[in-house]
Image: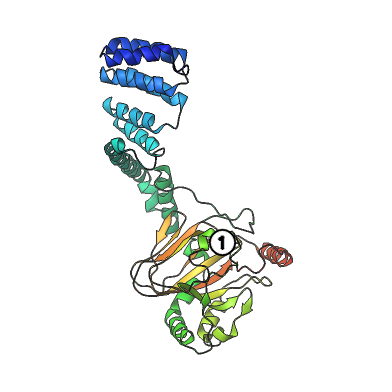
């Protein structure tokens, strides 16, 4: 005899086997009273109540099961199903989402159709929530700037759980109190339009340098094989993601920069950090067709990164946090690379962008000076571009 199972539950199993469901229910009620932390007893009681058409009692039994194990997938799925039967559609749809958060992988075959139903119901909950939030803020959005409207919209998708918060997580240098934004507002960078206006000239100089005899085209990722950087294994020292450095760790790469006077002039107008052996940095980034850059974060939040797309085939995309964008030739943006980001070229041709770093606008001149002094004096992350 299994002493971990109340005797009354064993008797209930026998009663159910002979189809005496009333007796089985009474015995299970006694069993869960004797051992309220046993999930299986509650689930059997819920099944008996559900089969008898007593949905309220079944819900009460499922609540007991979830007190025993709040993360049990089947119990959460059953709760949502029972709520749906009571006509509480909105609460049921939200409960389906709570169940899906605990779904196993793989899904047991006998639950596949129920999971599909749960996904459909939760999708309705999300769309209804987003519509209600949009209706509630429509008047405010009509008066908002584009940047404000984008953040209001993101607030709504966070509430609806379509997106989630992402935070700055630099690998080495974190300066406190700086605003965390995946993509920063254009109006905070007065030099962006000037840079964009130089797109054609910069693209011509890229063609010149990439075809120059003495140009230096190197793998973007170059780490010692003994470092614990598993996410870079496929791209480490690979020619699928390469760079033509113009400025690297604060040094001008003459073999490349000499071919790009207009590009260097445009870069000079950008307020870049100047930190010994670290910055400024600027390069052409070349991503081969069919190549994906895995999710990662940058070294320091004191600077942001600007992309100016030069060659963008179909199928290229870039994600920072919860926002995914497609590059468009000549349309620059500034983002925080200490927030998780990834990129892909799913197209059939080479993708090329100019990458330049710049100061985070939240740093005062005094703070910039302090950052430069402290990072110059630090050997943390030395040799890594920030």
Above/below status of 152 relative to 240: above
Horizontal arrangement in the rendering, residue 298 relative to residue 111 (left or right): right
For this orientation, the residue located farthest to the bottom is: 213
Image quarter of residue 81: top left
Indicate the position of residue 20 as horizontal and vertical percent values: 27, 11
Above/below status of 28 relative to 352: above
Above/below status of 36 relative to 135: above
Q: In the image, what residue occupies the spot 64% across and 75% down?
A: 250
Colouring method of the image: rainbow
Dividing the image into 4 quarters, which one contains the N terminus? top left
Q: Which residue is mark 1?
A: 298
Indicate the position of residue 269 as horizontal and vertical percent values: 56, 77
Dividing the image into 4 quarters, which one contains the C terminus? bottom right
Horizontal arrangement in the rendering, residue 321 relative to residue 90 (left or right): right
Horizontal arrangement in the rendering, residue 224 relative to residue 46 (left or right): right
Q: Nearer the viewer, residue 276 or 45?
A: 45
Q: In the image, what residue occupies the spot 46% across and 12% down?
A: 34
Residue 182: tell me if it is visible: no
Indicate the position of residue 131 as horizontal and vertical percent values: 32, 44
For this orientation, the residue located farthest to the front is: 1
Above/below status of 104 relative to 319: above
């Amino acid at each position: 005899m299994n002493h971990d199972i109340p005797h009354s539950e064993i008797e209930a199993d026998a009663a159910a086997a002979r189809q005496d469901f009333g007796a089985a229910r009474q015995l299970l009620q006694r069993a869960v009273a004797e051992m309220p932390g046993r999930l299986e007893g509650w689930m059997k009681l819920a099944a008996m109540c559900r089969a008898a058409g007593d949905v309220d009692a079944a819900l009460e039994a499922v609540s007991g099961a979830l007190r025993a194990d709040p993360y049990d997938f089947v119990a959460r799925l059953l709760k949502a199903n029972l709520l749906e039967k009571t006509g509480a559609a909105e609460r049921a749809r939200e409960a389906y989402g709570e169940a899906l958060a605990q779904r196993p992988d793989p899904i047991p075959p006998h639950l596949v159709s129920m999971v599909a139903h749960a996904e459909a119901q939760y999708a309705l909950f999300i769309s209804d929530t987003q519509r209600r939030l949009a209706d509630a803020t429509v008047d405010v959005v009509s008066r908002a700037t584009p940047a404000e409207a984008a953040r209001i919209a993101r607030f709504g998708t966070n509430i609806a759980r379509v997106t989630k918060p992402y935070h700055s997580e630099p690998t080495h240098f974190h300066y406190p109190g700086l605003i965390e934004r995946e993509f920063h507002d254009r109006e905070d960078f007065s030099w962006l339009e000037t840079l964009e206006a130089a797109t054609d000239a910069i693209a011509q100089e890229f063609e010149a340098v990439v075809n120059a005899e003495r140009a230096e085209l190197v793998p973007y990722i170059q780490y010692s094989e003994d470092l614990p950087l598993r996410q870079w294994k496929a791209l480490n020292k690979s020619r699928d993601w390469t760079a033509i450095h113009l400025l690297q760790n604060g040094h001008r790469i003459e073999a490349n920069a000499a071919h790009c006077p207009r590009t260097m002039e445009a870069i000079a107008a950008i307020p870049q950090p100047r930190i010994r052996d670290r910055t400024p940095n600027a390069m052409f980034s070349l991503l081969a067709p069919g190549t994906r850059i895995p999710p990662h974060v940058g070294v320091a939040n004191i600077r942001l990164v600007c992309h100016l797309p030069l060659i963008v085939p179909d199928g290229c995309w870039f994600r920072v946090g919860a926002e995914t964008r497609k590059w468009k030739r000549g349309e620059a943006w500034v983002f925080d690379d200490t927030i998780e980001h990834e990129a892909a070229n799913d197209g059939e041709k080479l993708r090329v962008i100019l990458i330049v770093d710049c100061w985070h606008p939240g740093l005062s001149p005094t703070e910039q000076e302090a950052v430069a002094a402290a990072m110059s004096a630090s050997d943390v992350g030395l040799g890594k571009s920030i």
